[in-house]
Amino acid sequence: MSQIKVVVVGNGMVGHHYVSTLAASDIDAQITVIGGEPRPAYDRVHLSEVFDGKEPSDLGLVTREEYVALGVDAHFGDFVDKIDRSAMQVITRGGQVFDYDKLVLATGSYPFVPPIPGNDLPHCLAYRTIDDLGEIKASAQGQKVGVVVGGGLLGLECANALKNLGLEAHVVEFAPGLMGVQLDDGGSQMLRRQIEALDVKVHTSKATQKIREGDEHRLKMEFADGSELETDLIVFSAGIRPYDELARQADLKVGERGGIVIDYQCKTSDENIFAIGECAVQGNFIYGLVAPGYRMAEAAVSQLSSEPQSFTGADMSTKLKLLGVEVGSIGDSKGQADGSLAFVFSDERDAVYKRLNVSADGRRVLGATLVGDTSDYDTLLQYYLNEIDLPDAPENLVLPALDGQAPTLGADALPLSATICSCHNVSKGDLVTAIDGGCTSLADVKGCTQAATGCGGCAALLKNVVDAELAARGMEVDTRLCEHFKQSRQELFIIIQATQIRDFKTLVNKYGCGQGCDVCKPAVASIFASLWNEHVLDADLVPLQDTNDTFMANMQKDGTYSVVPRVPGGEILPEQLIVLGSVAKKYGLYSKITGGQRVDLFGAKLNDLPNIWQELIDAGMETGHAYAKSLRTVKSCVGSTWCRYGVQDSAGQAIDLENRYKGLRSPHKLKMAVSGCTRECAEAQSKDVGVIATENGWNLYVCGNGGMKPRHADLFAVDLDTPTLIRTIDRFLMFYVRTADRLQRTSVWLENLEGGLDYLKAVILEDSLGIADELEQQMQHVVDTYQCEWRTAINDQEKLKRFRQFINSNSSDPNVAFVQERGQPRPATSAEKRRQQLKAVV
Amino acid sequence: MTILCKRSDLIANSGVCALHNNEQVAIFYLPDTEQKVFAVSNWDPIGEANVISRGIVGSVEDRLVVASPLYKQHFCLITGECLEQSAQLTVYPVALDGEHLVLAA
């Protein structure tokens, strides 16, 4: 089949999902996408996080470059004005013309603004796009009060945004309750109590009749009941309306209340035109959530393949957090079906409301409303979606359990078709396939299936399913450190901390068996170092170290070592650069600049290491711990000192952080970076700890990684002052040191941490475990007991004993040989060595 | 019988390297074992470098082993054989004689 020309109008989340799905398929298509907004698709669901420290760019789902790489012809900031169905062309406002074989309309929706006189006054705004956010932010500058018109899901999100901007937030709702679409009356009232407790003013059953200029504030709203409300700005979020103008002009069939009518194949009344997402209406229903939009996009793509699939509606159950209040709605949440029976639990003290609607025979879940506590959501949703038989007393599913343990649905009871992750459409069957395909851990399964990497709401359920499946295969994850210790690294850490044991022999005799090995010995040495911070070459400790730690240098393939002095923050004196150069020349070392902004000198012979370090230390340098599982570098940009864009002294901050955490032994290496502005030149978001300057302080990111398995760091806290930043990093690092597995980077650690980022935030920021003081003290001990290991070693003949190739000769290893390449030495290959020996003999 | 070095040249529970007739000999001193000293060739036949003396010693099941510091294969200190793949270290008969380490060959 020849290449098919596909034009996609609209680059929202659903439009983008269509493009990426099509580009990843086998279908030979030439894809053009035209987006009205000036930027590529972004995550609209998390829009309000922009007011909570996220940058608009953090929300991006795709970049222009990625579209280019996919071969997609993308145009932004231009609107399609007309569809010429007979010529099969679309024409943009900017005058561009595109031919299509298949056209996809993903034009989305716009916020409904009620026809109230005065709704066009300045500071009457909408909440839909990143540009809208900019306007809201500008309008809120220096003001006191903000009103959201609309008490639905988006309206409450928006109220949160206003609150984050420092405004007194009001919600004005026409209906008698909040979130009337998803919640029953009881749930709606409980939500209102909770939201009011957060200082958001709620006004229900209020019909706004007029908006005019205010007396004390910019605007005044007049309501039908005669009351008034003054405010500085008004944001309309009273529902959405499909963007169907284009379709109307092209004479495509539209619904009675708007929306482009589509069939089960997502086709419009023109068989060459599809419509997907919020602009489409199917069976009089508009799907205003992202997951059904994605399913439509996939169904529309499949129509171009040999295996077309249908979109026949989607479950609209949802679980979310609004202003920090947990809310869940499943199926028929209000119990409107004939014969529906309800079980209701309401706890006004802890502000929890739960309603379970079951069929007349008591066998099936029809729906549920949950407010204040959604921990039962996953279980109830599985009962609902999979029509699982209810137990005899279904009320126990929503009542607090007497023994404190909520009944959960066993993972075994779920059918293979059960959807576990609705964001990425991963079923239990997909998980089973992944495990059968070789995944042996939760992290593997996540990486392979993407499950729980969207909203993360299914993380607990996912863990249950994976654990059960692994156990069923007899592959229960073995946490034994090695054959000598049946404990995990975390358990050993606790034992060593509690017993104050400082030597391996005592530990292995008391809590392990055998002689130890190259797995447990370095792990125990690392724990000793994290806790007691004694010199790595102390007589009891030296047999435990990997060769790199033993010789405080990095062994290379030929048995020589590389040497890396510390260059905090990448800032180095000219004199030190000169010394590095002269040492490299004197000892014949290959020199290379590292990714961590320092210099690596390769090819050092074992017996030269002490002399090399003597010269470096004399020049004021110290060990860089490049050989250790510990802090490597804190990369930085020059920041506000030199850069036109910098807002803080990032280099100074990086140097301080590097000097604080240098020498901290950890389960794996640690990398950090500090950027002086949001341009992020130091690449902090790919580091274990990343710090980015803001105008008000520092944003902290954690658990990023580059390397083999890149992971974008998570935003952890915003606008911290320096003492708070350091306290937070102290706690974070020490908690990682305590609880991670051996050789587990922070990124994988977080992926495996039960409760994930929210749990980590609770422990570190809110001290939910009551250990914050202890973590800070432990870190302070490490900081206070820091020593340059090389400086100590070169002054101690006993420690230098092993820095000889031979104990009975002063010669070097004759097998180490170099050849010159690009003006520097490199290890000779074995063939080159043979030639050199031959020459020597001849 | 050759005296290779003094007991004080050895590092308890770890290794050093001695030169004997142009051969590099890795010597491990495990004071808690009955045999106390063990010697194998320093050449790592898998990593192809003279590094065995710098490996970590320990046990795999009941066998005393040293792990190559390059690619972590385990070699038995008694027989010299590699536990993971087909490779062999030379074993040297050594013993402590008072304060000296002696090689029987």
Image (cartoon, rainbow, N blue to C red):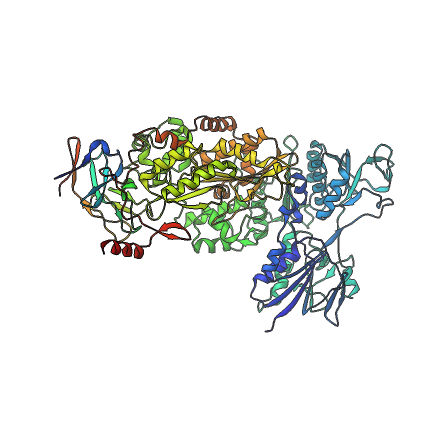
Q: Nearer the viewer, residue A255 or A736?
A: A736
Q: Nearer the viewer, residue A806 or A438?
A: A806
Determine the residue positioned at 62% across, 57% down.
A17
Which part of the image, by quadrant, shows the C terminus of chain A?
bottom left
Determine the residue positioned at 30% across, 30% down.
A797
- In the image, residue A359 sits, relative to residue A186, either above or below, namely below
Q: Nearer the viewer, residue A692 or A681?
A: A681
Q: Quadrant of residue A206?
A: top right
Coordinates of residue A572 in the picture (x, y in percent): 50, 37
Q: Quadrant of residue A581?
A: top left
Which part of the image, by quadrant, shows the N terminus of chain A?
bottom right
Coordinates of residue A559 in the picture (x, y in percent): 32, 45
**Res A678 seen here:** yes
Q: Residue furthest left?
A: B1
Q: Nearer the viewer, residue A54 or A827?
A: A827
Q: How many numbered tags mark residues here?
A: 0
Q: Residue furthest bottom?
A: A1
Q: Is residue A533 left or right of residue A570?
A: left
Coordinates of residue B50 in the picture (x, y in percent): 28, 46
Coordinates of residue A330 in the picture (x, y in percent): 63, 47
**Res A363 seen here:** no
